[in-house]
Image: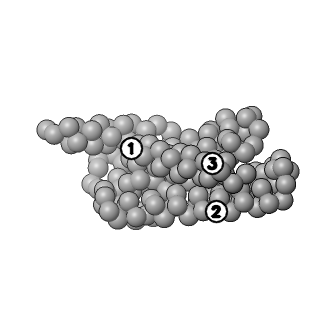
Amino acid sequence: MSLLAGILELDEQVFLSLNSLFPASSDTFWLAVTKTITWIPLYVVILARLIKTAPNHSTWLFRIALTIVGVLIWDQGAGLFKEWIARPRPCQEEIEGIRVLVHCSPYGFFSAHAANAFGLAFLMRKWLKPSWFPTLVVVALLQSFSRIHLGVHYPLDLVFGGLWGILISTILVRIDQQFS
């Protein structure tokens, strides 16, 4: 067995363990956690804090623009990688014991949910008070785990999605530092 095949097999085993970790009675919770609309109140509060804590009008406008650019890069980058890598989602494969709770598109590497959630957490880490960071990381972890529970992502899809989000956030923070 090749190294890559061994890693993918381990990824599948970890996925199966995590996919069945919580009982079916928690499905409604995980379905809510994965939906963007659930987090809109948090995003509104973040926006308000971003505006309130920015030193001036042009700074908060620039940071909001960078955040929008970040979301586009996190999301569209994930879409491009999914088509390029073409790794089937677990819900597309015949895996015994899998629980699938939502519609399943063909490819899952890497997760746009993880990229967006971790990207936002690490971007806001530089712009909001430090006390916000743990909350945003917990949200990112919950959103990421929800994708395993729902049967649509392997753990490595989420790890690489999170790393993509953090990488793009680091670049955006450097751009902000250059122009602020």
Q: Position of residue 85 (x, y in %)?
A: 31, 58
Tell me, yes or no, whether the two marked residues, 3 and 1, touch with CB atoms within 8 Å.
Answer: no
* Image position of 24 (left or right of 43): left
Residue located farthest toward the left when viewing the structure as drawn: 1
Looking at this view, is 148 or 43 the one in front? 43
Q: Position of residue 89 (x, y in %)?
A: 35, 56
Residue 90 visible within the image: yes
Label 1: few (<14), some (14–19) or many (≥20) C-alpha neighbours in 10 Å: many
Q: Give the residue type that dot 2 points to.
A: Ile
* The disc label shown at residue 68, or none: 2
Q: Earlier in the sequence, mark 2 or mark 3?
A: 2
What residue do we see at 50% from left, 39% from top? 22
Quadrant housing residue 16: top left
Looking at this view, is 66 or 44 the one in front? 66
What residue do we see at 35% from left, 65% from top? 83
Residue at the disc numbered 3:
173
* The disc label shown at residue 115, or none: none
Q: Earlier in the sequence, mark 1 or mark 2?
A: 2
What residue do we see at 84% from left, 59% from top? 57
Q: Give the residue type that dot 3 points to.
A: Val
Reply above or below: 97 against 103: above
Tell me, yes or no, whether the two marked residues, 1 and 2, touch with CB atoms within 8 Å.
Answer: no
Q: Nearer the viewer, mark 2 or mark 3?
A: 3
- Looking at the rendered structure, the secondary structure element under dot 2 is helix
Q: Position of residue 13 (x, y in %)?
A: 32, 38
Which quadrant would the N terminus be assigned to in this image? top left
Q: Position of residue 173 (x, y in %)?
A: 62, 48
* The disc label shown at residue 156, or none: 1
* Image position of 94 (left or right of 129): left
Q: Give the residue type that dot 1 points to.
A: Leu
- Looking at the rendered structure, the secondary structure element under dot 1 is helix
